Amino acid sequence: MLGIALVSQFITYQIYPFLPPDQLRTYQEAYMIRAFFLIAPIMLIEMFTGLQMIIRIGDFRLHRLVRADMAILIAIWLITFLFELPLHLAVREETWNVNIQQSLLIGNFARVLLWSVKGYLVIKMIPHFYAVTNQ
């Protein structure tokens, strides 16, 4: 997901100001449909995987990392559904304005940071996970 967020940050959202209003709406419609079918399953897999790890793993050190990972994922979901999705809908419905682009960039940057921390936590989990599964 970090890679997708980086592409959105540095490519997708940067294209918006260059598109004429009628093409922006068409582009946004296509982007939202394609992004949904790519991103939604990945986000659901992240959530279900984290929940399964919380339920099945008894190692407290690993459990703390998984809970921190899940807290970050919940924050990402909140940013996505409370801020980013309404902004994408606004792009689809309105003519372009720089405030929407700035808001998309800020919200997405927050998600980039959170996914970066999440990636770090996953890397920290690996040795604990192998220790738990090899017992």
Image: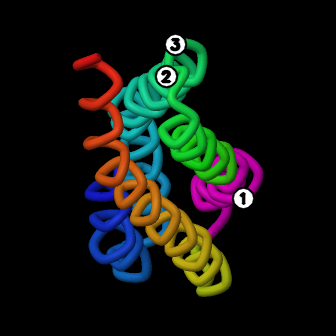
Q: Which residues are magenta?
A: 77-95
**What percent of the width, then of the height, locates residue 34?**
34, 35
Q: Is residue 106 above or below residue 119?
A: below
Q: Amino acid at mark 1?
A: Phe
Residue 70 picture quarter? top right
Question: Element under label 2?
Answer: helix
- Residue pointed to by mark 2: 53
Of badges 1 and 3, nearer the viewer stands: 3
Q: Residue at x 57, y 71 (%)?
A: 110
Q: Position of residue 1 (x, y in %)?
A: 35, 48
Against 34, residue 56 (above or below) is above
Magenta: main secondary structure equals: helix
Left or right, 5 with reference to 58? left
At label 3, which amino acid type do we have?
Arg
**Residue name at image x 33 percent, y 75 percent:** 15
Whether the residues at callouts 3 and 2 have beta carbons within 8 Å, the answer is yes
What residue is at 49 percent from the left and 55 percent from the top?
25
Q: Estimate the spatial distance between the alpha carbons at disc 2 and disc 1, rounded to whole Å.
A: 28 Å
Find numbered disc 3 in the image and state the secondary structure of the residue it sits on. Answer: helix
Marks 1 and 3, Cα distance to the nearest angstrom? 33 Å
Q: Is residue 57 magenta?
A: no
Q: Which residue is mark 1?
A: 83
The disc placed on residue 56 is 3
Q: Is residue 82 magenta?
A: yes
Say which of 128 and 117 sits in front. 128
Give the amino acid at mark 2.
Met
